Amino acid sequence: MSSSDRKPYLSAGVIDQDLLDNCADNLENRLELVVEIQTPDGNIYASDRNKYVGGRFYEALLNFPVVNRTIGEWLAPDLQFSSITLELSNVDGRFNKYLPGGASFGNWVGKKVVVRLGIDEAELSYRTIFEGFVTDVGGFKRSVSSITIIARDKFDTINVNFPRVLLTKDGHPKIEEKNINKLLPVIYGTWKEELEPDPAAVPSYCTNGADPLVNFKEMIVEISISSPGVLTCNEHNLQNGDKIQLGTSGALPSPLAIESDYYVKNISGNLTFELSTSPGGSSINTSGGQSGIHKFIAAPTAAARNPKYTICENPLKELVSNEIYLKRNDLFYLVPSSEIENVGVDNRTFEVKQRTAVLWVEGEESVFVAFQWDSGDEFFVKCVGYDLGSSTDNIIMQAKHILENYGGVLSGDFDSSWNWYRDKSSPAESAISLFKSRVWLQEPQGALSYVLSMFEQVRIEAFIDLNLNLRLSSLHFDEFISNPTFTIKNWDIEKGSFQTSVDEKNNFNRAQAVYNFSPIRNENLRSSKIHKNQAAITQINKEISKKLVFPNLYQELVVSSQLIEILKLASSTIEIISCNMTWRALLKDISQFALLDVKIGSSEFELVPCQIREIGYDPQGLKLPIKLWSFQMAPFPGYDPGYAGTVGGFDATIIFE
């Protein structure tokens, strides 16, 4: 008689690997799922059977679907969310109140869905395997017999668009029309180096270009015949005390005269004002006739106001005020530091003096003249973005700050891997702490989508782990595990479910990088040499080329090293293995390694390291749909496949064209 406990789950209070191993041996485990669904007026507690867990009754209202968790596709442009679709029985109409026309109908978008897995009714054994929110598109629908809810994990809720601060008329009453509703960019990292061929690359935006004492342009005005005379000009943008002159195509009312200095007073609503002949003097009464179109312009002797500039929406760690450049007619002029003033306390705003005695910009006759502002002037700066302390240039901490500041992620949602990768200093090709990254982003992007695009550049991936934390893992060869403790055998796999295929999306043998994004040119400034794995090309007698973009990286050696490492992996013929495993693998997580030791038909894998890329939970038949990456043809430290035809992997030879 066997000495193994035939029903180990009956006394188990927690789920651990020993329990799963024993359950697998004995073919039964009593693992069950429950779900909590937030509604517009409360919660629904449901399962696929009636049961109590911890005093809470879960009613048999649904057949559980497969719950999928994924790390997404490597080097893929689209963000992939873990998701779940739940269909609740409504044959008896119990949920009619939540439907359109019902007493408790309300918005389902954003409502929480939590799925937990445990042993029968042992509450302490239950753990959350999915936590998400009803999606904003197609997240709730009904049929004559059920309601269906679609939820995605919290990656969806943090993928909010940024940047989001606009230049508005309310915030800047004297802003030019062309800058109204322009989105201010977000800036991270150092924008003081690697900017060639331009002396500076970060643009700034004028916020008072419609001020007559900034632009010195004529504006049409109507003049009343009254005591006092009232001048009307919608959005004249003058201030009391401004000195102006009048002009006309006909005749001005008496006693006003052209080319005479007048002082503005009694402004009302940026629409009307009066004039006096001296500062603070009496308002001028107008009389007689008038004709033609009248205009006003700032007097030539009026004290010019500075044009004001804003660089971005966020505070800057540094603004290099002695390296601000005027770009006019494709020429750059270094602004003398004496002509920059009123730099904001957060370094994101500054002013430029005009009409001073300092001559620093070319005039019409190619002689240096005093600067006078023009609407087409552009000012570019050198700066350093958000102050992240010693991690200001670190791509991991920049990404973390984006998720916290724009995605609303809490510090407790990040696991320790974030700090580990922040500080990683070896080997050289994976020393993230030594890589410099920077961000200038003006076009709205999802915070998480953008962060994942940053991580791709340094071979990092992010996912929500079994503890519902945001975790990082890498595709660094030095971190691959050659001898993982968990081994997958034939009996761990559902019969007929084992399928293999080559990862076509990430299989290429020749690549070039474009990098070092420049805001001033709206393109990446540099291209790397073309790298290739000639042995892989020869093996299949075909070049498979790819262009990879590294907009956040700008150090040539760093970009080249990342391209080489990506090409080593991509040219190693990665295989995707899809199968249904038993619940013995329940505690395995995305990105973890396992040894594949199976022989199924013509597919033979003898102690081959694999990485889990996707994992699901299917209560029907107690199965775990899993997607693995096989490294059967990809050597890495500690693992040598020993197969003929191995051309990629850690020790692959990458050459330049």
Image (cartoon, helix red, strand yellow):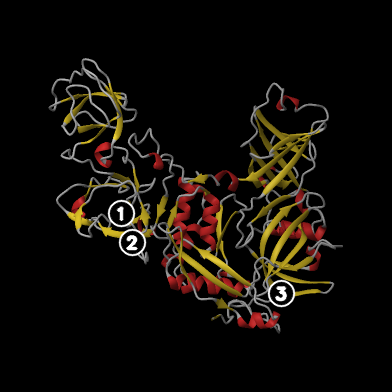
Q: Nearer the viewer, residue 485 or 247?
A: 247
Separation of residues labelled 1 and 3 (CA atoms)? 54 Å
- Residue hosting label 3: 607
Looking at the image, which residue is at 50% across and 47% down? 444
Type of the residue with mark 1: Glu
Return the x and y of residue 285 as percentages of the image width and height: 19, 18
Type of the residue with mark 2: Lys
Type of the residue with mark 3: Leu
Q: Secondary structure at mark 1?
A: strand
Viewport quadrant of the N terminus? bottom right
Separation of residues labelled 2 and 1 (CA atoms)? 10 Å
Looking at the image, which residue is at 14% across and 26% down? 277
- Residue hosting label 2: 192
Q: Residues within 10 Å of mark 3 (few under 14, many from 20)?
A: some
The image shows residue 373, relative to residue 418, as above or below, that is above
Q: Residues within 10 Å of mark 1 (few under 14, many from 20)?
A: some
